[in-house]
Image (cartoon, coloured by chain):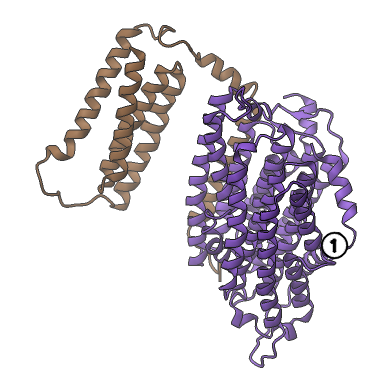
Amino acid sequence: MSLSDLLAMLPILILAFGATAILMAGAWYREPLPLLAGGIVTALLGALSAGLVTPPVPEIAGLFSAGGYARFYTILWSLLAAAGLMTGSRYIIEKRIGAGEYVSLVLYAAAGMALLSSATHLVGLFIALETFTLAFYILIASNRNCALAAEAGLKYLLLGAVATGFMAFGIALIYAASGSLVLPDAVMRLKAETGELQAWGLLGWGMILIAVGFKISLAPFHLWTPDVYQGAPAPVTGLLATGSKGAVVAALVGLLAMSGPVWNDLTDLVWLLAALTMLAGAFGALGQSNLKRLLAYSSVTHMGTLLVGVLCQTSEGFAATTFYVVVYVVTSLGAFAVIASLADGRGEPMTFDQWRGLGYRHPVRCGVLVLLLLSLAGLPATAGFMAKFAVFHAALQSGYIGLLMIGILASVISFAFYLRVTMLLFQPDEKASSWHQGSVFEHTVLAVCSSAVLVLGLFPGLLFGLIRQILP
Amino acid sequence: MTTVLFYILGFIMLTATLLCITRRNPVHAVIYLVAGFFALALMFYLLGAPLAAAWQIIVYAGAIMVLFLFIIMMLGLAPQETPEGPGWRRWGPLVLLSASLMVCTVLLIMQDPAAGKEIGDFYLAPQAVGESLFGRYVLAVEMVSFQLLFATIGAYLLGRPLSKGEGQ
């Protein structure tokens, strides 16, 4: 570690030490608003420093990259932390959650996600993954008066521990087979002289895929998702659905983009996982009557689609996947922010009975929700359409016609349940009750998310150009 | 010799952990887990990593398992009534495992009385571990220390008594 290493990881240092400082301040000073403001400023500073400070070295201590790809995701996760704190503000104040602890955990999780997206060493990858997972274990269960939240926290903890076990075992096997922990060497050396993966390397990859499957909820490892999303408070679910999954996908894309086509022996397996995930998510969502559970299944479908882009292993596939991650993060965060902004003393509106007719009570926010849901479904002119189109185009070019068909089928099915919610919102219902009016913070997040969805949908070239430049 | 010891230790480890997850009495399960940890420590030693072996015994078999036992006792999870059947059924397997562990330890000591580098082809000196941890991997160590800090905060946040009006 030298001074230039420290300068290169300035955004991470800002997030991590900002988190610690707010934690310390929170020990003496219990007023939530200044702590929250401090957290939001810290997150924005982190994003700003990642964007403006050019790192003097390409790699930090041999563990993390400081390249454009890493900085891109550092900015994204820092902004996500700021948005997450803004959506969580009313939750912390009204439920009297310890503000210092909550804010510092969110910042700390963002630092972990940023590090995971930039890992160039298997040890760094493992520790960064554990870093933000640990923060989520706590955040999910942070409302201790809610039995569902405790259940969700415990479920996430247990499955997270199982996933960690698989991850560690997979890394150990890859190390045993290749003799290196440095990426991309560790995976490139797994190839035997015949060009195929060595048996131990293949097993190691399989274990890592299982761990990734648990983390980003690929079928058949997705069963925890609806329960955890339902139990966790909506501001935390928003972070969990976007950041924790996006960072893992980002790490996977970074790893594969660096190491070339190392997945050739795994293609069939990943193909099957992607197809199963898209269909399981789409069919699972059809029978739901709870918006948070529905969004959970929708996120499962989206992870399947993302895996299609990763599977292509072409630069176009990686660019499409990165674009998809950004779009998914913005859209999904916005959808959970709408739920969070409506929450009041009765809790969050979740069941379809509570949502029926809400479009007439809260037209603006329900309109935003409809826009975000249509973007999740992939309606043209929204960002979701461009993202899906890019991924499917990459799949077509790589020759995955069958997977493309399954993806389109899943998209068509998902239109059914997204439209069902849309219709429900604007059904005339005299009994529909008013929910909370929402705070300035929440409305800001919704404005940013909905305008980002429109801008990315109408001018996708802006982001695509940037992504093509930074891909490793 | 080392290969034979490796397989014996592997067998002990698998048996102990298998017994651990099939026991109904949590105290018995913990004891079997301790036996498994001891076998793992000897295996680390056999592979040429004496420091990892010492950590395994001090941290896992010692500190963490004692904590487990403490929690089990404190929560009163241990069954009160003694089960039917002769007593050796309960302590027999453990005595066997421990005796074989003891034999393995004695064999290892006879093989390598000075705890030098004669066993195996590879020897990782504790000094090298320290240099690597606080040189090459110092960032990883710092990240783990941050994790411990936040784990403490999590335990405090979730474990402290409910304050007035919280979560309403």
Query: Is A424 above or below relative to A326?
Result: below
Which tint is chain B?
brown
The quarter of the rendered structure image containing the N terminus of chain A is top right
At 27% from the left and 43% from the top, the residue drawn is B27
Describe residue A17's horizontal placement relative to residue A386 as left or right. Answer: left
User: What secondary structure is marked by label 1?
Assistant: helix
Q: Nearer the viewer, residue A351 or A174?
A: A174
Where residue A34 sits in the image (x, y, percent)? 74, 58
Question: Residue B94 appears in which quarter of the rendering?
Answer: top left
Describe residue A158's horizontal placement relative to residue A272 as left or right. Answer: left
Three-letter amino acid code of the residue under disc 1: Gly
At 71% from the left and 58% from the top, the residue drawn is A85
The quarter of the rendered structure image containing the C terminus of chain A is top right
Query: Is A297 above or below relative to A114?
Result: below
Q: Chain of mark 1?
A: A
- Badge 1 crowding class, 10 Å Cα cut-off, few under 14, some 14 to 19, many 20 or more, is many
Query: Is A69 above or below relative to A193?
Result: below
Where residue A324 sits in the image (x, y, percent)? 76, 54
Chain in purple, by letter, is A
Where residue A328 sits in the image (x, y, percent)? 73, 58
Q: Nearer the viewer, residue A31 or A439?
A: A439
Q: Nearer the viewer, residue A265 or A98?
A: A265
Taking the view exactly as shown, the residue that stands out farthest to the bottom is A430
Query: Is B139 above or below relative to A376?
Result: above
Q: Is residue A369 visible?
A: yes
Where residue A57 sits in the image (x, y, percent)? 81, 27
Q: Which residue position is annotated with label 1?
A: A457
Q: Nearer the viewer, residue A256 or A102?
A: A256
At 76% from the left and 30% from the top, the residue drawn is A6
Q: Is residue A145 visible?
A: no
In the rendered picture of this protein, how many numbered marks are placed on residues? 1
